[in-house]
Amino acid sequence: MDFEAFRRNGYFEIEFSQKSRLNDIQRSIESVFPCWPTEWHTQRACQDDHIALVKKAQDELARTDLVTTLVDGELNALLPLLGPDIDIQSIPLLRISRPSHESDFVDWHRDSFYGNLPHELNLWFPVYPLRPGAGLMLVEGSHVVPSRNIRVVSDDNEFRKTIEKGSVVNKLGYAYSPKTDDAISNKDPRQIKLIAPPWGHGVVFFGCMVHRAQNQSDETRLSIDVRLRNAYTRTETNPGYYKALCRGIVDNCSQQFLTYT
């Protein structure tokens, strides 16, 4: 891994060592779909039906430990960044984004607008191969640009205007009370990168980076994102948001000591 490039750009790509887990994730998702998942847009579902399907598929995935097991196989890349004591988001977020269907996306944002602090990392990966025009857009280098003048903005999308904190839709990863800051409003188009890793690969990036999803392809884009942090790093997320991914020797020994005192 090129640590200097990660420091400079704010993201890096990894190749999963346990691709069979990705096949298992696909099967879990396919079990709740009425059609082949990447053809979901052909069903012309209304927004309520779309949200119901996303929830059903995410709930089904959450019943398994497939994403946690997949990430556990990449500790060699994560340990130098987060240390031996790493937490993972308890419920990974499944994104099902129909082509050019703006209601399915979260607009430009930083996760630090919504409780995730700058020390927390995101892992994003496609469930199926991405078609041209689909992926994740990042503003390269924005992970070290201070978030100044944070303010609530009016969203032009009628569906996104209705999202409330703590609602079912919000728990599926849709942002409530859309916000912006000076880095977003003044972003340099030359720094915007469409990241489209091949199937079997993922992207690790700072959640405080300016980012958003994109799908201008001809298929429904399915992806998963999950957050990671050092277990002893402060977070402003709700209790239960994280669970243990791995623990080091010092933590294991200290927990044994604390158990008997």
Image (tube, helix red, strand yellow):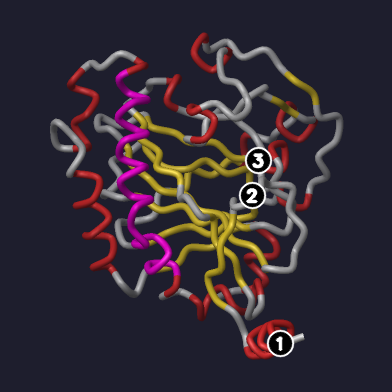
Depicted 244 relative to depicted 176: above or below = below
Question: Magenta span: helix, strand or loop, mainly?
Answer: helix
Place of residue 91 in the rendered image (x, y in percent of width and height, measured from the top left): 47, 50
Residue 52, numbered circle = none
Place of residue 238 in the rendered image (x, y in percent of width and height, measured from the top left): 66, 45
Q: Which residue is mark 1?
A: 260
Quarter of the image with the N terminus in it: bottom right
Residue at 51 percent across and 81 percent down: it is 76
Q: Which residue is mark 2?
A: 207
Residue at 67 percent across and 68 percent down: it is 231
Q: Residues within 10 Å of mark 2 (few under 14, many from 20)?
A: many
Residue at 36 percent across and 29 percent down: it is 216
Chain part drawn in magenta: 49-71
Residue at 60 percent across and 21 percent down: it is 164
Q: Which residue is mark 3?
A: 210
Q: Is residue 3 magenta?
A: no
Among the 4 quarters of the image, the one containing residue 18: bottom left
Label 2, label 1: how many angstroms apart (C-alpha)?
Answer: 38 Å
Place of residue 144 in the rendered image (x, y in percent of width and height, measured from the top left): 77, 52
Q: Is residue 50 magenta?
A: yes
Left or right placement of residue 189 versus residue 123 in this view = right
SS for callout 3: loop
